Amino acid sequence: MTADPAESRDAKLVCRNVWKLFGARGREVLETLGPDPAPGAITAQGLVPAVRDVSLTVAEGEIFVIMGLSGSGKSTLVRLMSRLIEPTAGEILFNGRDLLAASDAEMMMIRRHKMGMVFQHFALLPHLSVLDNVAFPLDVQGMGREERIARARKMIELVGLGGREDAFPRQLSGGQQQRVGIARSLAVEPELWFLDEPFSALDPLIRREMQDEFIRLQSVLKKTIVFITHDFDEAIRLADRIAIMKDGAIVQQGTPEEIVMSPADDYVREFSRAVPKAKVVRVTSAMRPADGPEPQAGVDARATIAEAAPLFLDGAERLKVTEGQGGTLGHLHLADVIRLMLGG
């Protein structure tokens, strides 16, 4: 497992040696078997090792993607993070607070006020309008009607559904229903946002649109996000960092670029085998120090080589690489882009 660079940044969520064994006497069996039991030794005790010794850190403002095949433990892990499922062992820290020491009442308040959740199935209330669906968690919080309706309208506008406030779920497309689900989870203004395969039930074109919308929302909101998916293309589009799970354990974590360029084992290599390097290598990895005249055209530092390449079609030999409203970080040269896209 690669070192976790988020340890040196502001940590929003930290998991340390988290285990989840389904079955009776899980904690007792784990203590008996020692610190690093083999999966076979656990199953021999009649237990299912759903999550095994997971340690990770989610930094403030980052999109942390957890991915793996069906049954790898990723959805169980995200439910452990919010204590919807109780861990068998380990630590889970949120803003430095040990969630396992929190009472049920405290956890309910944390989930209502500081955590947002979006799942694969939209779970909208069919008898409520879009506006009332989005306002529903605020009603649960006890917020006054005027304030919660105003905030719900703001969230509906944010996800691009302005004008559909009075529609009912049955009158919306799948993509629109998922936007309502996203607006509803954002209405509580969460510090930590969990999304468990939120787009996997959508058609491919709508899924791509929702990914674009998600990227746009994150550029505005700067949320701390844990995003679950089994789709590697989706992971590399969205993630600042990725953790890949297999049989309940994390086999590698790092940036999309690190995972594609340096897979830890054959399992990870198979995930990333068909991904063109230009889709994951950031322009900051290929840029050179700024020298000579400043190019007119520029590209954001988060862009990949594949995203930057079309900007050379107007005849430019170099692009300036910029970060937000800041200055130029370096220059991206056409020759380097061609070399990388041809496999160099």
Image: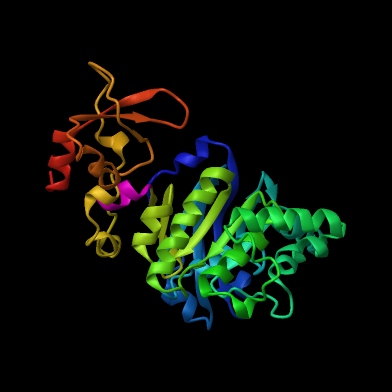
**Residue 258 appears left or right of 202:** left
Q: With 287 as the anchor, is 94 left or right in this view?
A: right
In the picture, the quarter occupied by the C terminus is top left
Outermost residue toward the top in this view: 292
Name the residue located 47 percent from the left edge and 75 percent from the top edge. Answer: 201
Q: Position of residue 281 (x, y in %)?
A: 28, 44
Query: Hey, which quadrant is residue 229 in on the image?
Result: bottom left
Question: Can you tell which quarter of the image residue 85 is in?
Answer: bottom right
- Of residues 15 and 163, the one nearer the viewer is 163
Asked which colour scheme the image uses, the reply is: rainbow
Q: Where 202 sits versus 141, above or below?
A: below
Q: Is residue 87 magenta?
A: no
Estimate the x, y position of residue 245 in percent, counting from the top left: 41, 63
Query: Taken as a whole, is the magenta stretch helix, strand or loop?
Result: helix
Residue 99 drawn above or below residue 339: below
Residue 162 place in picture, x, y as percent: 63, 59
Q: Position of residue 69 (x, y in %)?
A: 39, 71
Quarter location, residue 204:
bottom left
- Residue 57 visible in the picture: no
Front residue of 219/81: it is 219
Q: Is residue 100 visible?
A: yes
Q: Residue at x 45, y 44 (%)?
A: 4
| Magenta-tinted stretch | 255-261
* Vertical arrangement, residue 46 with respect to residue 268, above or below: below
- Residue at the location (51% across, 78% down)? 48
Magenta span includes 256: yes
